[in-house]
Every structure is written in structure tokens, then in C-alpha cells.
Amino acid sequence: MLFSISYHENVNNWATKSLIEAIRGKGHDVRPIRLADLGAEIPHKFVHLDEDISDIAGLIVRTIGFGTGDQITFRISVLEQFEDAGVYVMNPAYSFRRAKDKYATLTSLHKAGIYVPKTYVGENLEAAMEFVEEVGDVVIKPLIGSRGLGAIRAGMPELTYRAMKFIHQLGQVLYVQEMIEKPDRDIRAFVIGGKLVGAMYRYLPEENRDEWRTNVHGGGRAELAQLEPEYEECAIKTAEALNLDYTGVDIIESENGPCVLEANASPSWSALSRVTDLDVAGMIIDHFIEKCRR
């Protein structure tokens, strides 16, 4: 069978490369594609550059890429057309888009009864400041982002206002979230096919005690985690609520139990593989091929 994997600029990205190697290792062909290089015809025909790829059995989405509103809309729509044509898409187009949007993620999880932080989302600076005055210590995040990049913790009202005013002047949506008390760690739980396959604690960097983010790419330390049943159930329920075939779920241990910050639709797993000794890429591909054959 022939499969495709979407990538943006670097096909040798660690996660993308490991998925390609896993597919080939199982005796299948794979064609890396950039969604920006795709064209589609109606009825169902798909062309990557000058090659007809309408016969692919499945497509793994690693990125939508950057672009204008029209470009992003087209890329999501062409993924949906693949699905309509009977091509299995992992993660599905709508699920991928929703998980990339922190606002859509939290509303979906709250609807499913999953505990999430109190959050303000909008374009009204005054309303955002009223929210800050109500909850106190907050984190300002980009609506779409990963690895903790662009997130600002602002415990002082003056600093918070300056940061939000700058974001507002750039024409960006304000995404402001209460800072919940927790241990000096959080949890990354990895779910594939509705099952928890592994989890790790991510501790704050020891060499930088001013850092409040636990992301491993930012210097956080990873350690194997054996989750309590309520945390395992929370991770699985999160994947189900967002309809994600595989996902890395970020959970904090609050005084009210598991609290989900976000679920990544195109997670990396280098640290998880290191602490669990799991072949995560192989597990993702096994599930992917199984779904393609149905």
C-alpha cells in the first residue's frame, strides 16, 4: 500500500522521519507531501506537484503549515475531500484543526466533562483585564502554538496589561488562562487508538528556577510516570472527546484532580520514547495501517 505524510518545510523533522522509517520498515511505500504542493479536482482526484496520488491508502497529517486564511481553508478542505474519497486521514481534518486551536480544544473538553482551567478568549482588551483582576496570576498564550513557545506568565497587573496590549495591537486574539497551583511537574500522557500507551512527568528545569514551563524542549526533565486510574481515564477521555487517533495530552495535578491544558494533534515523542523505551512511531503506524485496511 502507498501512504503519504504531510510536512511543512523539513521532511527530516525527527518525528516525521521516524514515521516514514516505520512505514517503510513494515514493507509499505510512503510519499512525503507538502499540503501547499497539493492540487485537487472534482470529482476525486489529487495531484502532488505533477504526480497523481489519488491511489494513496492513507494520509498522516503532521502539519497544516503556515499561510493565508484562503490557503489554510483550502488545505483543511482538501484533507476533508481525501476523507470523502475513502482515504483514511490521521488525525482527521476536523479533529486536527480543533486540537490545534486551544480555544476549540477547551470548549470541547469542557463539554465532555473534563476539568480545564478558567480561560478568557477574545479581542476585547478591557474584558481580558477584568478577567485578570478576577483570577489573579495568569498565563497569556498564543491561540495556536506548541512547546510552550510564546507563552507569558504575568503575575503583576501592569506587566499583564503591557503584554496583552502589545498582543492586541498586533491584531492577535487574547488567550488568557488562570495559573493553577500544581507540583513542579506536569504530565504528558500519550494515547494511541483509545489506549494509554505511556506517560511521563515533565519537571521544571533545575538550572533555571525562574522558569515555570516544563516543556522538555525548553530544558524540562522527563521521567517515567505510572498514572493513577483517574489520570489515565482523563487522558483517554480527552482523546475520545477530540476524536484523535493519537495524541499527547498535557495534564496538571491540581487540588481538584486532573486538569487538561491541551491535547497535541501532531505531538513529538522523543522524550517519551527515551524514558519508556517504547517504539511509539511503530505503534502509531500499526494503528494507522489497521484503520486504513478497514
Image (tube, helix red, strand yellow):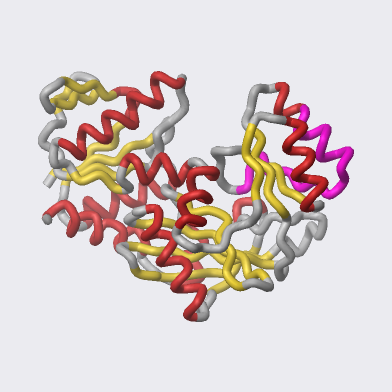
Is 29 in front, or is 210?
Answer: 210
The magenta segment? 148-165
Q: How many marks?
A: 0
Is 89 in front, or is 6?
Answer: 89
Q: Report whether 48 appears left or right of 211.
A: left
**Which residue is located at x 11 percent, y 47 percent?**
1
Q: Is residue 127 above or below residue 119?
A: above
Residue 237 is situated, as x and y percent measured from the top left of the image, at 41, 65
**Which residue is located at x 42 percent, y 49 percent?**
265
Q: Is residue 30 above or below residue 284?
A: above
- Asked where in the image residue 50 lies, by quadrant, the reply is top left
Residue 235 is situated, as x and y percent measured from the top left of the image, at 46, 66
**Which residue is located at x 54 percent, y 45 percent?**
102
Is 160 in front, or is 47?
Answer: 160
Q: Is residue 98 above or below residue 234?
A: above
Q: Is residue 157 magenta?
A: yes
Q: Is residue 21 magenta?
A: no
Q: Report whether 18 appears left or right of 124.
A: left
Q: Report whether 76 appears left or right of 51.
A: right
Q: Quadrant of the C terminus?
A: bottom left
Residue 221 is situated, as x and y percent measured from the top left of the image, at 64, 64
**Which residue is located at x 77 percent, y 52 percent?**
135
Residue 261 is situated, as x and y percent measured from the top left of the image, at 58, 56
